[in-house]
Image (cartoon, rainbow, N blue to C red):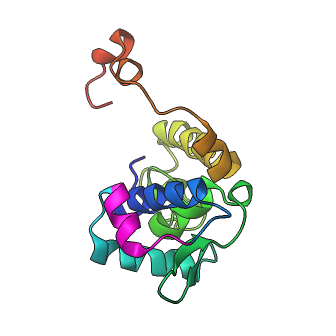
Amino acid sequence: MRLSMKSDYALRALSTLVERFGKQPVSIGDLARRNDIPKRFLEQIMLELKAGGIVRSVPGRAGGYVLAKPPDQVTIGEVVRGFDGVLAPIHCCSSTHYEACTQESACRFRRFLLEIRNYTAQVMDTATLAAVFAGEPVADHEVFSEALVEGAGI
């Protein structure tokens, strides 16, 4: 699974709003600068997050964006599905965007990919913004561990 740029940017901006939860609204310009997101693109993303009930806008000179609900009530799955639609790695494993495949009845990989979908959905649907924000950033040695170096494409 690979997140779209919209999901990536949305999660970045939401991280800032989690950090500022209960404080003053964060302007779109500040959100864009702090998270290295093109402002125009972020404006579209924030409108979608607002339509999804995840953020709300506060008008006025000191206005901006705030979370519409507490960070422990927003899941990563909710955010990612809002932008990417599905978590399934292939269409024949999606319950909401299913597309038939000519190999379904004989495919041995479909079960494996379905398990990946189920595991990914379970993890993303239980991970809240609050829980993720409370974690530590990933260190380089975790990404480039010797056990994974041989796994091209990881």
Give the main secondary structure, helix, strand or loop, of the magenta stretch. Answer: helix
Residue 1, image x and y in percent? 42, 46
96 displayed left or right of 3: right
Does 92 appear in magenta?
A: no
Residue 140 drawn above or below residue 45: above
Residue 65 is at least partly visible in this image: yes
Q: Residue at x 38, y 66 (%)?
A: 30
The answer to which of 41 and 84 lies nearer the viewer is 41
Q: Residue at x 64, y 77 (%)?
A: 53
Q: Residue at x 66, y 49 (%)?
A: 130
The answer to which of 37 and 153 lies nearer the viewer is 37
The answer to which of 45 and 104 lies nearer the viewer is 45
Residue at the outermost top position: 146
- Quarter containing the C terminus: top left
106 displayed left or right of 6: right
Residue 52, image x and y in percent? 59, 77
Please state the total of marks drawn on the protein image.
Answer: 0
The quarter of the displayed image where residue 101 is located: bottom left
Residue at the outermost bottom position: 60
Residue 138, image x and y in percent? 44, 30
Residue at the outermost front position: 61
The quarter of the displayed image where residue 39 is located: bottom left
The quarter of the displayed image where residue 41 is located: bottom left
Residue 5 drawn above or below residue 61: above
Does 30 appear in magenta?
A: yes
Q: Residue at x 44, y 74 (%)?
A: 27
7 displayed left or right of 53: left
Residue 55, image x and y in percent? 59, 73
Residue 101 is at least partly visible in this image: no
Identify the magenta region: 25-35
